[in-house]
Amino acid sequence: MNMPSVLVTGGAGFLGSHLCDRLVGAGHDVMCVDNFHTGSKQNIAHLIGRVNFELIRHDVWLPLYVEADRVFNMACPASPVHYQSDPVSTVKTAVLGAINMLGLAKRCNARILQASTSEVYGDAQVHPQQESYWGNVNPTGPRACYDEGKRCAETLFFDYHRQHQVDIRVVRIFNTYGPRMRPDDGRVVSNFIMQALRGEPITLYGDGSQTRSFCYVDDLVEGLLRMMNQDELVGPINVGNPAEITIRELAERVLRLTGSKSRIEYRPLPADDPVQRRPDIARARQHLDWHPGVELEDGLKETISYFRHLVNQ
Ligand code: NAD
Ligand code: UDP
Ligand code: UDP
């Protein structure tokens, strides 16, 4: 059987590297494209040397001419700390990266999946968030480089689909966590676990009453693969775990699971930080027969054991 060849941009990142694992394991020819801005060779070191895996150092702002049957466009810093450190680069990655990969998909007649985000809903006025909701995004605030960059990327995907018949898939990913997040990633799960393991204060922004819904990485990758492998729906489709908790509860849970004596230190809430977020996953259940299977408690234990290993190295 001829397996489709797959290009994964951002393949050395947190989600991208887990996706590469699944694709290489399934026997696809996989090209991982990354500029190592927030990803690392360590994440894919175990794949180097496999005959069906190639690593290309490349920036997706620039054109890329390779052949592929399928493209997962994952390249983009995802943590507010990193995407806000050079916001102009973030917009370029999101928008020019989408244009280049769509151009490649058009030329290769490839199916292309965009890693979009729940951030397209912004500080949502509708709860839980359904795909039909258009969002509430501040176009000039500090999160806009990411939120609006990703919204523009969705626009480009749908325009290439309507205008050039490119075979697109758009997945809106909700907060996902797990092994291979960077210790200095800056997102909440890795921050809290690292702080707890090092006995440092847990930095809780605001009063901790804001909510998020955390999906374990293996569940998320399964959702991406199912979306790519079906012929019916282009999206957008929410993929995430609808189990919602406050950030204060998350801090308490991490403290309990690590057995840490760290204290909670309150810090100001960053500008435009969404108050609540939970995916409505009815569409994913219906069209992909997908729902998350890993409980937060179990996923956190896996993630803690990964970070514990890093700390003890
Ligand atoms: P990550 O930062 O670990 O991975 C992003 C990868 O893209 C890194 O390897 C980075 O080096 C690479 N990259 C960044 N800019 C690039 C460029 N210009 N050219 C080539 N490579 C580049 O983040 P992640 O959590 O793995 O996120 C992967 C994708 O999923 C991103 O597009 C992100 O927006 C999306 N997403 C993630 C989450 C989540 O909770 N993890 C939620 C919503 C959306
Ligand atoms: N592109 C690319 N790889 C390809 C084909 C195109 O990187 O295999 C880039 C190309 O540089 C262009 C962009 O994708 O800027 C959009 O391509 P498209 O064909 O839509 O645009 P055009 O070339 O007509 O401007
Ligand atoms: N957060 C926090 N302490 C941290 C990092 C994040 O309290 O050290 C909060 C942040 O303000 C937000 C939530 O946790 O309300 C999730 O933040 P993250 O950066 O992980 O993701 P996003 O805001 O993009 O959903």
Image: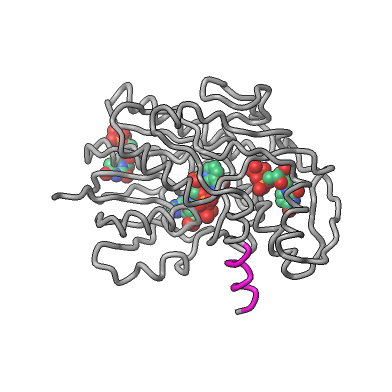
The residue under the point 86% across, 55% down is 265
Q: Does the magenta stretch include residue 310?
A: yes
The residue under the point 48% across, 45% down is 220
Residue 76 visible, this angle: no
Q: Is residue 168 magenta?
A: no
As rendered, which of 56 and 27 lies closer to the eye? 27
Quadrant of the displayed image that contains ligand 2: top left
Residue 231 percent location from the top left of the image: 28, 30
On the rendered structure, is 88 left or right of 159? right
Span shown in magenta: 304-312
Say how the picture is coloured: one colour
Residue 236 percent location from the top left of the image: 45, 28
The residue under the point 48% across, 41% down is 94
Q: How many numbered discs? A: 0
On the rendered structure, is 288 left or right of 66? right
Residue 270 percent location from the top left of the image: 76, 43
On the rendered structure, is 153 left or right of 146? left
Q: Main secondary structure of the magenta part?
A: helix
Answer with the quarter of the image where residue 309 lies.
bottom right
The residue under the point 64% across, 31% down is 122
Give the farthest residue toward the left. 1
Residue 292 visible, this angle: yes
**Does 145 sit above or below residue 165?**
below
Residue 103 percent location from the top left of the image: 31, 38
Which corner quadrant holds the C terminus? bottom right
